[in-house]
């Protein structure tokens, strides 16, 4: 436990990457990053209208930690995705990041990333899961 005079555990997106990373390893790493940051993204996205029963207002420090955690995770995942050479694997990885962004209610970033998906089958799968991206 880091509370007892030990270091905080590192997040998966803070770990050093041994480049070059293959496309399969990159896609797996992006998937792990998105899954690890899902809890923070859901707390951020569900914040509108949610209040703690005891305090009557959300904890600002927790909101700031969750926001920073989500943004670092999304940024790292996007950086890894940009370096992928296989189009289908990159599109699949970007769809994971789009899902993370939508959980955090970051529609602007999700739409930008959605437009980067080139494979029709992956675009349709994302639209089936998130019809709000249709325009």
Image (cartoon, grey):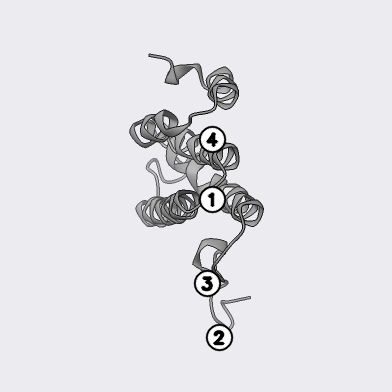
| Label 2 – label 1 distance at C-alpha | 25 Å
Quarter of the rendering occupied by the C terminus = top left
Q: Nearer the viewer, residue 18 or 101?
A: 18
What's the residue at 42%, 33% (across, down)?
116
| Label 4 – label 1 distance at C-alpha | 15 Å
| Label 3 – label 1 distance at C-alpha | 17 Å
Q: Nearer the viewer, residue 119 or 27?
A: 119
22 with respect to 8 (left or right): right
| Label 4 – label 2 distance at C-alpha | 39 Å
| Label 3 – label 4 distance at C-alpha | 23 Å
- 132 up-or-down from 30: above or below: above
Q: Nearer the viewer, mark 4 or mark 2?
A: 4
Disc sitting over residue 37 in the figure: 1
Disc sitting over residue 95 in the figure: 4
- 77 up-or-down from 13: above or below: above
Reading the image, the residue beneath label 3 is: 16
Q: Earlier in the sequence, mark 4 or mark 2?
A: 2
| Label 3 – label 2 distance at C-alpha | 24 Å
Q: Earlier in the sequence, mark 3 or mark 2?
A: 2
Q: Nearer the viewer, residue 24 or 95?
A: 24
Reading the image, the residue beneath label 2 is: 5
């Amino acid at each position: 436990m880091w509370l007892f005079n030990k270091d905080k555990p590192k997040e998966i997106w803070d770990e050093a990457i041994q480049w070059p990373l293959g496309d399969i390893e990159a896609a797996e790493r992006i998937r792990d990053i998105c899954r690890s940051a899902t809890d923070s993204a859901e707390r951020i996205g569900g914040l509108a209208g949610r209040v703690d029963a005891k305090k009557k207002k959300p904890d600002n420090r927790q909101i700031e930690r969750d926001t920073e955690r989500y943004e670092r995770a999304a940024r790292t995942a996007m950086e890894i995705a940009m370096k992928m050479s296989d189009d289908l694997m990159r599109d699949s990885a970007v769809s994971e990041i789009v899902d993370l962004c939508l959980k955090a209610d970051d529609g602007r970033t999700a739409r930008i990333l959605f437009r980067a998906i080139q494979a029709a089958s992956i675009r349709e799968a994302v639209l089936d899961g998130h019809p709000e991206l249709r325009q």
